[in-house]
Structure formats: C-alpha cells, structure tokens
Image (cartoon, rainbow, N blue to C red):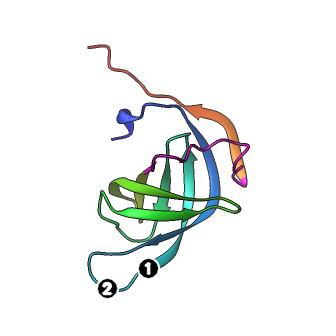
Amino acid sequence: MRAERREDRELCADLVKVQWKPEFGPPRCEWAILEDISPSGACLEFEEPISPDTLVTLQFKSERCQARIKYCKFEKSNYLLGVQFEQGYRWSRRRFKPEHLIQFRLRQVRNSK
C-alpha cells in the first residue's frame, strides 16, 4: 500500500487528535502518533482500527483538517492508518511543523518491470 504514494513523505513524530464517527455508537476522539507526512496525506499509528473510507478530523497543534482513511493495517502491536487530506488542505512546514521532523524523505520506489 505504501508503494501507491504519489509524493515524498517526511518522517516525523508528534501527537495528533483524531475525531470520527464510527458506523455504530457515539462520535469518538483518540490520540494517534504521526509517523510521516506529505502535502496530501500522512501515516498515523493508532491503537484501534478505523475502516477505510471513514472521514476523520485531525487536530495538529495549531492546525485542523479533515482526511479520509485510505488503509488500516495491523503492524506489531498497533494499527497504521494511511490518511489522505480532503480537498482544500495541503500540509506544509509553514502551516504545521511536527515536534520531531526528520530531514529525510521517504520516496516512492518504482518497480523496474
């Protein structure tokens, strides 16, 4: 799934508040760890699964945006959620700089087939 990225992502670490409405039950609000970020999306480490295509609200320190879950995959002890920011939001360092932003970019690896 990570090979489907269209943009380079920057490794980072920060806390992000995630709000969503599950299919059943009341609205939810939990914290996630921001693992990497790009202008159009991010990867979050989360303690529970959220179904793909679910609309979520992300609250960074001073930024707030909506995103759609693109994938949810269990890895080791938590879930990795791939989110795509909804139209109208593009991340940049000027808008929000994660607490730990590593000056290293994850690049898409293309198959040589």
Report how far apart the C-alphas of labels 2 and 1 lie in the structure. Answer: 9 Å
Magenta-drawn segment: 84-99
Query: In what element is the residue under mark 1?
Result: strand
Q: Residue at x 33, y 75 (%)?
A: 22
Question: Residue 31, position in %: x, y?
Answer: 55, 71
Q: Where is residue 105 in the image (x, y as percent from the top left)?
A: 59, 32
CB atoms at circles 2 and 1 under 8 Å apart?
yes
Secondary structure of residue under mark 2: loop
Residue at horizontal 54%, vertical 47%?
89
Determine which residue is flagged by label 1: 28
Q: Is residue 88 above or below residue 3?
A: below
- In this picture, residue 107 sits left or right of residue 111: right
In the rendering, which numbered label is found on residue 25?
2
Residue shown at 60% from the left, 43% from the top: 11
Amino acid type at circle 1 is Arg
Q: Residues within 10 Å of mark 1 (few under 14, many from 20)?
A: few
Q: Quadrant of the C terminus?
A: top left
Which label number is shown at residue 41? none
Question: Which quarter of the image is occupied by the N terminus?
Answer: top left
